Image (cartoon, rainbow, N blue to C red):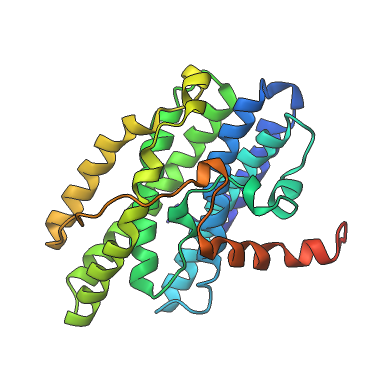
Amino acid sequence: MTGEVHVSVDELRLSQELAGDGSRAGSADVAEYALWLGDDALILSQQLGAWITRAPELEEDVALANIALDLLGHARSLLRYAGSWDGRTEDDLTYFRDEPEFRSSWLVEQPNGDFAQTVARQFAASAYMFELHSALRTSVDPTFAAIAEKALKEVDYHRDHAVQWVLRLAGGTDESRRRMIRAIADVWPYVGELFRDEPLIDRLGGVAVRPSSLRPGFDAVVDAVFADAELETPAVADSSAGGRRGSHSTPFGHLLAEMQVLARRHPGATW
């Protein structure tokens, strides 16, 4: 399994090597794009961590913890790179930004819900991240390219893990199938935001990946998995999500308060 704890520790070491030189952050736009990607990984990691000791089986406790650690490693690499533009650390960006300063998508902000809800969210997120990191490896920015090269190996496992659970729940009992269908319907309105081309993308040129270009690969994976699971892609309108612009979903405030409370109550504390 690729998401082992020691792999994530290695990844955190890589983030220090990749983003330790502040001169490598060329502009505020580069930093903003790093926040887009880093915040998605950070918030999804926080969400998955809440399943530890609560997953439906012991092996899944371990798997979700490993995936969360992988994503945390991606977040640290990207947030450190974002902060190198203006001197903020990854901890500053994680614990001392207010809600409008985050750039996470609404998809990753959605509550864990029951296990099917988490699986549906994870399937959509990991399928998107696989397409993203596959394309980002050719970025003209060497830091983004290096982070993507490393992250892709782990996201490949994350996607496969989610696919197996979609198939397992959809093909299980009547109740597990019902919950899987409901979860996909609940999650799908938030998928469209991932592929929306914001003005930032035009300004970055070859540094960034155009989100809309990732949609065909994403849809191909979804169509294949849903065909195997005998599921239909929900015909739902996209939400009014604006996470890339700092407008967040209602559940995000609660998640952020829980994530930041210790650091804000004891700023600068070490142990």
Q: Position of residue 158 (x, y in %)?
A: 40, 53
Please report the residue visible at 42 percent of the width from the left and 47 percent of the height from the top. 155
Please report the residue visible at 55 percent of the width from the left and 66 percent of the height from the top. 49
State the image quarter where residue 187 is shown: bottom left
Q: Position of residue 29 (x, y in %)?
A: 60, 26
Near-viewer residue (243 or 166): 243
Near-viewer residue (236 or 97): 236
Please report the residue visible at 69 percent of the width from the left and 22 percent of the height from the top. 24
- Determine whether, in the image, residue 236 is placed left or right of residue 1: left
- Determine whether, in the image, residue 89 is placed left or right of residue 199: right
Please report the residue visible at 53 percent of the width from the left and 48 percent of the height from the top. 104
Residue 46 vertical placement versus 91 (above, below): below
Count of residue discs:
0
Residue 145 vertical placement versus 271 (above, below): above
Instruction: Name the image quarter holding the N terminus.
Output: bottom left
Tell me, yes or no, if residue 84 can be seen here: yes
State the image quarter where residue 50 is shown: bottom right
- Determine whether, in the image, residue 173 is placed left or right of residue 202: left
Most extreme residue toward the front, as rendered?
240
Q: Position of residue 244 (x, y in %)?
A: 52, 41
Near-viewer residue (69 or 261): 261
Q: Position of residue 10 (x, y in %)?
A: 62, 46
State the image quarter where residue 175 is shown: bottom left
- Determine whether, in the image, residue 60 is placed left or right of residue 147: left
Near-viewer residue (101 or 35): 101
Residue 215 vertical placement versus 104 (above, below): above
Instruction: Name the image quarter holding the C terminus.
Output: bottom right
Tell me, yes or no, if residue 161 can be seen here: no
